Amino acid sequence: MSTATIENNEIHLSFASVDEVHAGLDEAVSTLIEAAAEDGRCGILVTRREPGSYTVALDESVPFGQTREVLAA
């Protein structure tokens, strides 16, 4: 089971199973692609906070049209 909260063009995700991660992150990125296209100034940053916990967000440090991944934990 996964949980997601959305606020200010950020999606916070928590996964109980590793099997859920790929599909959950793909869905979150797809959701933010629409917002990024409307804005046209930033890309998408996927951050792993800790095992099973991720944030997917619009980020001005990422060029428009790109998605980057970072590991915070």
Image (spheres, rainbow, N blue to C red):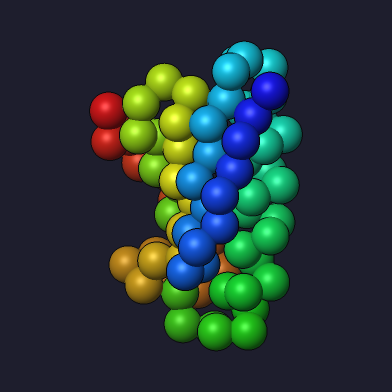
**15 or 45, which is in the foreground?**
15
The quarter of the picture where residue 36 lies is: bottom right
**35 or 42, which is in the foreground?**
35
**9 or 33, which is in the foreground?**
9
Question: Looking at the image, is 68 positioned above or below residue 59?
Answer: above
Q: Furthest residue to the left?
A: 73
Question: Looking at the image, is 51 positioned above or below residue 68?
Answer: above
Residue at horizontal 69 percent and vertical 72 percent from the top? 34
Residue 41: x and y, percent?
A: 46, 82
Q: Is residue 16 left or right of residue 57?
A: right
Residue at horizontal 40 percent and vertical 35 percent from the top? 48
Q: Is residue 38 left or right of residue 62?
A: right
Residue 16: x and y, percent?
A: 58, 18
The quarter of the picture where residue 15 lies is: top right
Residue 60: x and y, percent?
A: 36, 72
Question: Looking at the image, is 64 positioned above or below residue 16?
Answer: below
Q: Is residue 16 among what the camera can see?
A: yes
